[in-house]
Image (cartoon, rainbow, N blue to C red):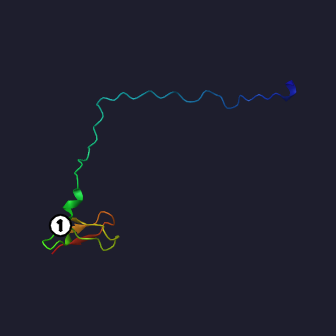
Amino acid sequence: MDAYTLNLNFGLLGGAKKKKKKVYKKPKKEKHKKKKVKLAVLKFYKVGDDGKVFRLKRQCDNCAPGTLMASHFDRDYCGRCHLTIMKK
């Protein structure tokens, strides 16, 4: 049996030192929590006197129907495809 035994000590030569744990000086920042608004979709549509529903925001020309653009004071901007349309 001694003739068939192999010496397999070639890969165990010590290795690297252990890393010290970091000591943080300041406490972690609290993440900003988004305020939940119930029925927030109602801000995007308006019901007229005759019962028709109107969109208050413009739809994007490049994206799928239903993608509304953000309305700034001088432009409309799509956050999905980054299309910007300047207002007159």
Residue on which disc 1 sits: 46
Query: Going 30% across and 74% down the picture, which residue do you hit?
Result: 61
Seen as rendered, the residue at the extreme front is 51
Where is residue 38 drawn, in percent x and y? 22, 52
Q: State which quadrant residue 67 falls in.
A: bottom left
Task: Answer above or below: position of 3 versus 77.
Answer: above
- Circle 1 crowding by C-alpha within 10 Å: few under 14, some 14–19, many from 20: few
Q: Is residue 81 left or right of residue 8?
A: left
**Amino acid type of the residue tagged 1 in the rendering:** Lys
In the depicted view, which residue is nearer to us: 80 or 10? Answer: 80
Task: Answer above or below: position of 31 versus 41.
Answer: above
In the depicted view, which residue is nearer to us: 35 or 47? Answer: 47
Q: Is residue 8 left or right of residue 46?
A: right
Where is residue 72 drawn, in percent x and y? 18, 64
Q: Is residue 85 left or right of residue 15?
A: left
Query: Going 23% across and 55% down the picture, which residue do you hit?
Result: 39
Query: Going 28% across and 66% down the picture, which residue do you hit?
Result: 78
Q: State which quadrant residue 43 falls in.
A: bottom left
Where is residue 19 drawn, in percent x and y? 47, 29
Q: State which quadrant residue 6 falls in.
A: top right
In the depicted view, which residue is nearer to us: 61 or 41? Answer: 41
Where is residue 16 drawn, in percent x and y? 55, 30
Query: Going 85% across and 24% down the picture, which residue do you hit?
Result: 2
Task: Answer above or below: position of 32 versus 25.
Answer: below
| SS at badge 1 | strand
Q: Is residue 28 left or right of residue 12?
A: left
Pick the quarter of the image with the N terminus. top right
In the depicted view, which residue is nearer to us: 83 or 43? Answer: 43
